[in-house]
Image (tube, grey):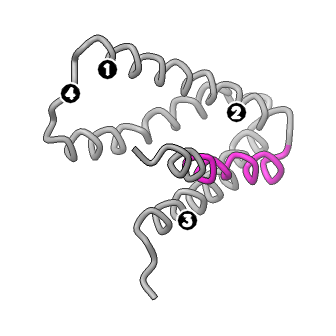
């Protein structure tokens, strides 16, 4: 039986989030109170650079620059950044092993939305 590509990628995302979730607390727990919270944000943002390069390479380095694309891209960036800040706050106030299972359900939401609107 062949596993669909979307399912294998969703599994990889969930596993990588789990690994990241297990490791993100380590520096903060071991080096507190001197560990700067912003370092976690910086590491996360730097790890997004290869993802952006891969995404741009897939579209032959051409970006859409009409009004709707700029508006939706900016909205996605702002909401994604706000979500990350809320996520990091949840990690600070909660336990990673409780926060990450909820966060790893994001691919399920994507699957449900794509099923409801199969464009």
Image position of 90 with respect to 118: above or below = above
Choose the circle earlier in sequence order: 1 or 3.
3
Compare marks 1 and 2 and give the one earlier in the sequence.
1
- Give yes or no for contact between labels 4 and 1 (Cβ–Cβ under 8 Å): yes
How far apart, in angstroms, are the residues tagged by discs 1 and 2?
26 Å
Q: Nearer the viewer, residue 88 or 32?
A: 88
Disc 4 or 2, which lies upstream in sequence? 4
Which residue bears the numbered disc 2?
A: 87
Tag on residue 63? 4
Q: Which residue is mark 1?
A: 69
Kindly state the secondary structure of the residue where label 3 is placed.
Answer: helix
Give the mark toward the camera: 1 or 2.
Answer: 1
* Membership of 81 in magenta stretch: no
Judging from the image, what secondary structure is the residue with disc 2 in?
Answer: helix
Task: Name the residue: 66% across, 52% down.
Answer: 104
Camera-side residue of 93 and 73? 73
Q: Nearer the viewer, mark 1 or mark 3?
A: 1
C-alpha distance separating marks 4 and 2: 29 Å
Quadrant position of the C terminus in the picture: top left
Q: Is residue 87 left or right of residue 73?
A: right
Q: Earlier in the sequence, mark 2 or mark 3?
A: 3
Q: For mark 2, does the 10 Å Cα neighbourhood hold few (<14), some (14 to 19), or many (20 or more) residues?
A: some
Instruction: Report the Cα–Cα distance between label 3 and label 4.
Output: 28 Å
Give the mark toward the camera: 4 or 2: 4
In the rendered structure, which segment of residues is drawn in magenta?
95-110
Q: CA distance from mark 4 to mark 1?
A: 9 Å
User: What residue is pinned by disc 3?
Assistant: 11
Circles 1 and 3: CB atoms closer than 8 Å: no
């Amino acid at each position: 039986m062949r596993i669909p590509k979307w399912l294998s990628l969703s599994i990889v995302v969930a596993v990588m989030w789990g690994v990241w979730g297990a490791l993100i607390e380590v520096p903060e727990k071991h080096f507190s109170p001197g560990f700067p919270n912003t370092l976690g944000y910086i590491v996360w943002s730097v790890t997004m650079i290869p993802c952006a390069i891969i995404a741009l390479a897939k579209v032959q380095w051409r970006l859409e620059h009409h009004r709707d694309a700029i508006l939706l891209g900016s909205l996605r960036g702002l909401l994604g950044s706000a979500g990350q800040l809320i996520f990091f706050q949840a990690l600070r106030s909660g336990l990673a092993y409780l926060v990450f299972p909820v966060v790893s359900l994001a691919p399920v939401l994507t699957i449900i939305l794509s099923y409801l609107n199969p464009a």
